[in-house]
Image (cartoon, rainbow, N blue to C red):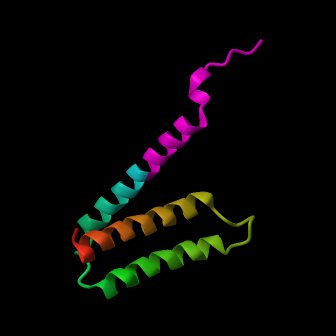
Amino acid sequence: MAIDVLGDFRDDSLIQDIVLKRIVFDVAQEYFRATALYKPFNSAHEGYATLLEEMDELWEEVKKRPDAVSKDEMRSEAIQVAAMAIRFIFDVIKE
């Protein structure tokens, strides 16, 4: 007889919460890495161009053949998109 060591931790909402917190943490890390390396966006146009560049990099991975796609690379590019969207809000919208 197998013992269920996860017990109550098998709840999907708890797992989603843990995964979401990890994603948000990774996006924040990328945001802080980028702000340490690069100056703030000078304009909405520059911010948009940077965000579009990150989206293009994600698209390059997404459109690969299914056997050539890297989920790790897609995740990394999606995190960069999210981080640059946050940076756009901070640098351009200045909330």
Residue farthest along the top direction in this orientation = 1
Q: Is residue 80 magenta?
A: no
Q: Which residues are magenta?
A: 1-23
Q: Is residue 13 magenta?
A: yes
Query: Which image quarter: residue 84?
Result: bottom left
Q: Which residue is located at x 38 percent, y 80 percent?
A: 50
Query: Which image quarter: residue 69?
Result: bottom right
Depth check, front residue: 74 or 47: 47
In the image, residue 7 lies at what x, y percent? 61, 21
Q: Which residue is located at x 33 percent, y 88 percent?
A: 45
Examine the residues drawn in magenta and state their main secondary structure. helix
Q: Quadrant of the N terminus?
A: top right
Q: Is residue 47 above or below residue 35?
A: below
Q: Quadrant of the C terminus?
A: bottom left
Depth check, front residue: 42 or 33: 42
In the image, residue 36 lies at what x, y percent? 24, 64
